[in-house]
Image (tube, helix red, strand yellow):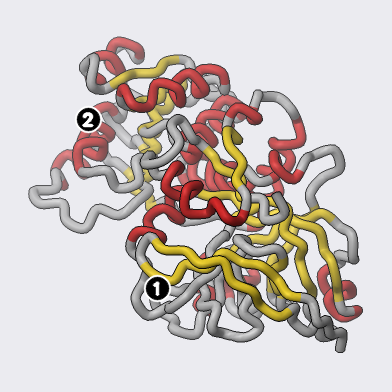
Amino acid sequence: MRTSAEQVLAAVRVGPGRTDIREFSMPDISDDSALLKVEVAGICGTDVKLYRTPPPETGPVIMGHENIGYVAKAGTGFTKQKGFKEGDLVFVEHYVMCGKCEWCHLGQYRHCENTDWRYNPHAIRFGYTSAQRPPHLWGGFAQYMYLPWNSVVHHVPKGLTPELAGLVTPMANGVEWSLFDGGVHYDSTVLIQGPGQQGLSQTVICKQAGASLVIVTGTSKDSARMEVAKDLGADQVIDVRKEDPFKKIMELTNGKGVDVVLDCTSGAGTEPILLGLDVLKRKAGVLVVQGEIKEFPNFPLAKLTEKFVTVKSARGHSFASCELALQQLTSSRRPLQKVTTHTFGLKDVDLAIRSVGGEGIPDVIHASLMPWK
């Protein structure tokens, strides 16, 4: 066992829209665990939702589930099992798997019950688990994070900066949702609804896969993001408040519609889903839906069946998509630095989250929380 009297600073969510800076004792590191010195914790739309309306049963939480850092300490068992040593720059997925179920053996840790906080009160997931649970450091909005034996860890390739590597989670979602779930491939035509960090990641991945037409929709408040979408490869962008998106999309596809619709509006309402169904090609299109729509009265099931549409839910990422995302970030094929728009220090967590949610600093796309800044 290794112990330290050092204290760790962390930003703790203590209630809806409220954060305190607190100190925690540096945890003991056993033979099969490790300690991550956090360099970058990305902030996404899920953080905005959970900050505004946290699950009542979790109590105080150190948020931060998109984490890049250096292995500061590692037990010999952890190093032997995981293949990571002290000093390595790594990406840590937020899923803390059981390592035994069928999902874990498939590399689909997102479905493992050990990390499913929605249904398992004992689940562990970085950025979601209560800070009251020892050893407390379960999130990236802290100087250090505790890594148990069942953490899922990836090497960050040489030459990739921690800040740019901080995009790996939305980029991995881009791979998972557009390629694996949506089946986007060479010559596909794609509609991406919503130019946030998820939608922009889809744009990059779809063009990299060889899609012949990528259309991104947004509103006037998304004007800066729409420009970034064009820089990242979007063939057309449409402000749905200024022109009829259905008419424009059908013009762009010569009346055929698109092969795949990727809804990245985070449950903004039924309107994007209805548009997606309308602009899909006449037969066998794919609709991938992100976000939560609590109710959908009068859902057009007949249209779904008549057009033979496949609907899939966008839910996290897999080990394979993370590895491909790291390769994409290392390739320098697209100006992805335009997505990492702002950096914040630990004391500015509240401002950072609100800015990602459109309530603080304007035109923030992806925010990097740097605990040592």
Q: Amino acid at mark 2?
A: Asp
Looking at the image, residue 68 sits to the left or right of residue 128; the answer is right
Residue 250's place in the image compared with 44, above or below, is above
The residue drawn where x is 42% and y is 27% is: 190
For marks 1 and 2, the one nearer the N-term is 1
Pick whichever, 68 or 302, lies toward us.
68
Q: Residue furthest bottom?
A: 1
Q: Identify the residue under disc 2.
A: 278
Q: Which mark is residue 118?
A: 1
- Which quadrant: the N terminus? bottom right
Looking at the image, residue 245 sits to the left or right of residue 17; the answer is left
Residue 116 x/y as whole percent: 47, 73
Residue 287 can be seen in this image? no
Residue 170's place in the image compared with 60, above or below, is above
Q: Amino acid at mark 1?
A: Arg
Residue 120 can be seen in this image? yes
Quarter of image, res 338: top right
